[in-house]
Image (cartoon, rainbow, N blue to C red):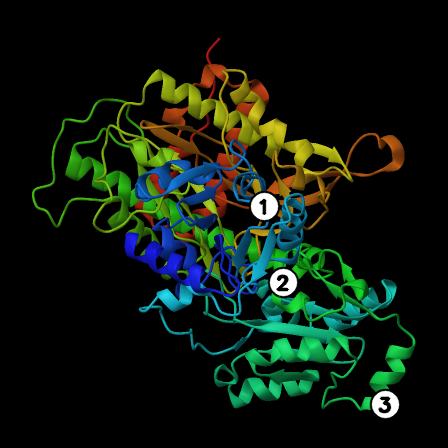
Amino acid sequence: MSEILSSLRSLMASHSPPLDALVVPSEDYHQSEYVSARDKRREFVSGFTGSAGLALITKNEARLWTDGRYFLQAIQQLSDEWTLMRMGEDPLVEVWMSDNLSEGANIGVDPWCVSVDTANRWGKAFAKKSQNLIPTTTDLVDEVWKSRPPPEMNPVLVHPLEFAGRSVSEKLTDLRSKLKQESARGLVIAALDEVAWLYNIRGTDVAYCPVVHAFAVVTTDSAFLYVDKKKVSNEVSEYFKGLGVEVKEYTDVISDVALLASKQLFSSFSSKSEDMEIDSDQTDRLWVDPASCCYALYSKLDADKVLLQPSPLSLPKALKNPVELEGLKKAHVRDGAAVVQYLVWLDNQMQELYGASGYFMEAEANKKKPTSETSKLTELTVSDKLESLRAAKEHFRGLSFPTISSVGSNAAIIHYSPEPEACAEMDPDKIYLCDSGAQYLDGTTDITRTVHFGKPSAHEKDCYTAVLKGHVALGNARFPKGTNGYTLDILARAPLWKFGLDYRHGTGHGVGSYLFVHEGPHQVSFRPSARNVPLQATMTVTDEPGYYEDGNFGIRLENVLVVNDAETEFNFGDKGYLQFEHITWAPYQVKLIDLKQLTREEIDWLNTYHLRCKDILAPFLNQAEMEWLKKATEPVSVLA
């Protein structure tokens, strides 16, 4: 790590102009959350492997900013040369730079890896001390990273209409209607899931995310896809021709955006005269999403003629069509069956190998140990078993994120990822948290269950019960249309707040339809950005409160919900009302619940959910698995 920092500082000093600081973001050219191996520049320079964070290297310091999901992980992974900056507690990176760097300081960043929003925000913060944001002509990290992985060269795949539910021509028609409404003559699309969704394509360029490294430009009468042409087969090329979409090289996007700005970008599928005629009816504005478009592309446009607004594709993508909703529900049933099969297998293994009392019994383990090194269970080997069970299901295409398989104190690391050489062995006397999901052709899944195969403490039960109460409260909510996720977030936290407990992550995120497992634009969160987009019918959102006790244990429960219209007795304000529908199916461990703390309504909900869980999953389980599930979903009650 010292050698990397030393090499970067040498390049900073020799840069023209010399750089006082270098920012290394987590994002790729598309501002993605999950990036390919060759784009993990921040991980390369810092050693921190979390999906969110930002590294800052100055002449004498190295600092890393990350959010509450990763505080513990960052502490473990950062060397002594690095200082952890806790987002939400420490100053923002732009505030720190403005306050701590000298007047007139030059701060370098790769303009491809920083969004318009971020670059503009930093520029304003730097102005008070005449500091300068310097877009580097090459990425300095790439010059140091001698073993950088090669580009992904995977084929572009057409996503069939039977799973997509809407044709590309329909989506383009709707998009062009929005362009005209906003008096814009074109849109630059950088977000990988938006490109994939618009053109009904998928790929495998990014682990866990079925997308292709590509940009798109759509005008009022033309459409372009920018992708490495070696990824496009003759069949797929014909598919795009049939749509009137011109396929160009990935690297052409920078010059074509400049041509677009000067009204010189023409498609081979439309004449120049037609283009000019269309443009004459429009203003000169071009639409750019400031959160997903990189500063490199934005800099080729006339800032006075740019419409900086959230992408017009973000909301339509989040509003699932009937085919997508049906596919998501079917995918979650198959996925739930895999999770139950996993719990049955794990319960048996923990009893057989470790002498655990098991999923149902509440007693200390007899401290039995596996007879051989090969038979012992680790966080990684058990998660591999879960993946194999999912892989046997119809339409499986891989995991939707790295499985968070975590025992005891590791479960307190919110986005923990077990590593082969460092993961923990399973322990019957400690809580086990498993947050996992899969990609299926008909939907993306995300589920968390927390279990204990021994005797949980009263404190662990109290915490689990509080998390469950918050999970149920949010899932049972009815609320007027126009309500956002910021408003609803309190429902999941209130039972924890009663004990003075809380958690440092959001409560819910959208889920894609065989796309990203984290999908906007809506969310359920304490973060102010959750106010931006109200929840609407046909959106998906997770319900995942938790509690994490550093060095001890972690608890999280997560289902995917669909937002539906609600039938209410009254309709105050004529707004209409919404409610949630659970589409995730796997039991909650009754042994971890203090039933005396549940209300009658909560117990009724739990019994009803468990009954449905048993009935829905029955066709996918064998007799032994079904017997286990029947026991796991037996009705519960509280004796007076």
Looking at the image, is mark 1 or mark 3 earlier in the sequence? 1
* Disc assigned to residue 103: 1
Question: Few, some or many C-alpha atoms within 10 Å of disc 1 (few <14, some 14-19, many ≥20)?
Answer: some
Which residue is the extreme one toward the left? 371
Measured as percent of width and height from the top left, residue 628 is found at 34, 39
Three-letter code for the amino acid on which mark 2 is drawn: Tyr
Which residue is the extreme one toward the right? 281
Depth order, front residue of 348/617:
348
Three-letter code for the amino acid on which mark 1 is drawn: Glu
Q: Quadrant of residue 185?
A: bottom right
Q: Which residue is the site of mark 3?
A: 273
Q: Is residue 367 above or below residue 127?
A: above
Looking at the image, is mark 1 or mark 2 earlier in the sequence? 1
Measured as percent of width and height from the top left, residue 343 is found at 33, 42
Mark-to-mark CA distance, 1 and 2: 24 Å
Asked which secondary structure carries label 1, the reply is loop
Question: Few, some or many C-alpha atoms within 10 Å of disc 3 (few <14, some 14-19, many ≥20)?
Answer: few
Mark-to-mark CA distance, 1 and 3: 52 Å
Q: Which residue is the site of mark 2?
A: 295
Asked which secondary structure carries label 3, the reply is helix
Q: Is residue 241 above or below residue 162?
A: below
Measured as percent of width and height from the top left, residue 570 is found at 84, 30
Q: Is residue 534 above or below residue 113?
A: above
Looking at the image, is mark 2 or mark 3 earlier in the sequence? 3
